[in-house]
DNA sequence: ATGCGAGTTGCAAATAATTTGCAGGAAAGG
DNA sequence: CCTTTCCTGCAAATTATTTGCAACTCGCAT
């Protein structure tokens, strides 16, 4: 536990409270916009600046600890790298974000490689559609 | 040809030069950001205002003549509704946008319906990855 | 322990992208 | 031709994100 900080140090980054908090927030939230990360961080460190959150998300992404995907409109959302093992199913009606194992897309991904030589990263963008609940309601 | 304007009138929209030009631009461009549409329109109607483009894209989307998808970062890109019969393969390296028939995703889409009840609209978001060219170069 | 230098932070201002309020202008129908 | 309603242009307002810069502090080397 005492050494866990080294995951940042090992990447050549300084260990600042803000940076740790941003990383922890991303991990705790699963996926979140920069704003949401900031809000989460403020729970324990009220003074943190939004720019710092943006900068740290970028930095953490550069060293591979987090990644961003495009879930909804406008904004990107961030994930801890370890969490990127599932697809994001975004419902256009209710806005919920569901998960599905990445293997579900395997046949599709393989077809794109075979036919177009296109190597898909299915986690980077959301899969958009209508969730079961909203389908039932309509 | 003389009646083709009715495609707008029939939707309950007025037939303004700006609106026609926006629709034509979207069709001509295949897929484009609001900025790109505006640029295209300005070729024949220099005075058009960006807000007008935004508003018309929205209006045209409401009546189902165009649709938007999320191809790259930030911005949405618009397509003519008729064109939405393919997937968008966005290359993260070179930024190129390739197409693939929608059927390629059929097994994947079916799996999501069967297992999660999630009805996918595969055209709304891009499929992100690395294209054949960039794979070859690296 | 102490100090130095580079990486970081906070803050405010700058950008970029999109939206909105409003007054004048122009379609469609009578 | 006239009226009503919708649409457009323009400017200002928003929202999201980035950047310049001075102050600060982390981590290494004394």
Image (cartoon, coloured by chain):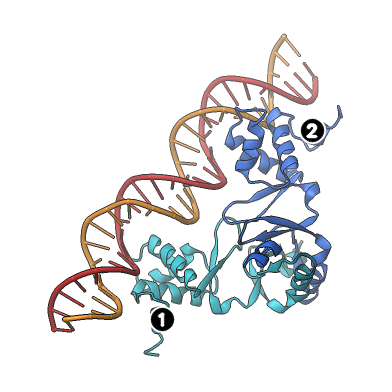
Chain colours: A cyan, B blue, C red, D orange
Determine the residue positioned at 74% across, 34% down: B13
Q: CA distance from mark 2 to mark 1?
A: 64 Å
User: Camera-side residue: C21 or A106?
Assistant: A106
User: Camera-side residue: A124 or A21?
Assistant: A124
Determine the residue positioned at 54% across, 70% down: A67
Q: Is residue B93 above or below residue A24?
A: above
Name the chain under label 1.
A
Q: Position of residue A77 (x, y in %)?
A: 54, 65
Q: Nearer the viewer, mark 2 or mark 1?
A: 1
Numbered disc 2: secondary structure: helix
Q: Position of residue B89 (x, y in %)?
A: 71, 60
The residue indicated by pointer 1 is A10
Q: Is residue B23 above or below residue D29?
A: above
- Left or right: A79, with B105 as reference point: left
| Contact check, label 2 and label 1, Cβ < 8 Å | no
Image quarter in which the N terminus of chain B is found: top right
Image quarter of residue A130: bottom right
For residue A35, which numbered disc appears in the image?
none
For residue B9, which numbered disc appears in the image?
2
**Res B18 seen here:** yes
């Amino acid at each position: 536990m005492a050494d866990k900080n080294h995951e940042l140090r090992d990447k050549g980054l300084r260990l600042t409270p803000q940076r740790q908090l941003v990383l922890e927030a991303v991990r705790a939230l699963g996926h979140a916009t920069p704003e949401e990360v900031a809000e989460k961080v403020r729970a324990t460190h009220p003074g943190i600046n939004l720019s710092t959150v943006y900068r740290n998300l970028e930095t953490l992404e550069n060293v591979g600890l987090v990644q961003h995907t495009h879930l909804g409109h406008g904004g990107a959302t961030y994930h801890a790298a370890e969490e990127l093992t599932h697809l994001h199913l975004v419902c256009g009606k209710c806005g919920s974000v569901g998960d599905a194992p990445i293997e579900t897309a395997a046949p599709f991904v393989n077809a794109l490689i075979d036919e177009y030589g296109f190597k898909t990263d299915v986690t980077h963008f959301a899969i958009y559609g209508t969730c079961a609940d909203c389908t039932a309601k309509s």
